[in-house]
Amino acid sequence: MAHVAEVMVRFGDKVICPKDPSYSTVSPKVAKWSPFFDGCIGAIDGTQIEIVADKESKEDMRNRKGFSNFNVLAIVDHTMRFTFVGSGMSGACHDMYVLRECQTKPRFPKPPPAELPVQEIRDWIKTGVAYIHPKGMPTS
């Protein structure tokens, strides 16, 4: 069984990854909304997978609803290709902890550095499309 698990992990490393790890181009599916989604690399979501835990780890795996589970976080690109899957964290973990823990993994996809479209933001503010939030952030 250990050999099967090892082969599946190696297979997952080859299949669950972005086609372009540098995200050098904007996906055609969101290009029409440029520049708003230029740095968007996909969608992220999490779920809980119910498990049968042994007595020693049952309490650690118990979630707020009372059953034992693993947290799973997944990221897909615009073509619904999985680019990252983080799993195995206890059901007792908060979603933000799961996200932060996954972000420490070297394979966690990172969007390209964004360039702030300063002139466009100024134009949005002038035309009333956006306004300055009291904390200084433009919002629409």
Image: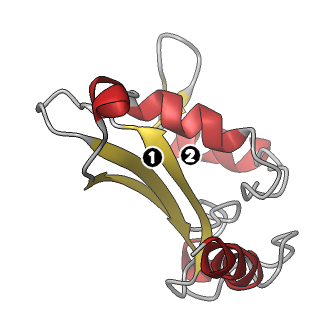
Circles 2 and 1, Cβ within 8 Å, touching? The answer is yes
Give the numbered dot on residue 86: none
Depicted 17 relative to depicted 62: above or below: below
Name the amino acid type tagged 2.
Answer: Trp
Name the amino acid type tagged 1.
Answer: Val
Distance (Cα) linking label 2 and label 1:
5 Å
Q: State the residue position of label 1.
A: 129
Q: Residue furthest left?
A: 65
Q: Nearer the viewer, residue 54 or 128?
A: 54
Whichever of callouts 2 and 1 sits on the residue coming sooner in the sequence is 2
Determine the residue positioned at 54% across, 88% down: 79
Q: Give coordinates of residue 120: x percent, y percent.
A: 69, 50
- Dot 1: what SS? loop
Depicted 119 relative to depicted 55: above or below: below
Quadrant location of the C terminus? Answer: top left
Q: Nearer the viewer, residue 59 or 26?
A: 59
Depicted 130 relative to depicted 19: above or below: above
- Dot 2: what SS? helix
Give the numbered dot on residue 124: 2
Q: Residue furthest top?
A: 134
Q: Nearer the viewer, residue 34 or 11?
A: 11
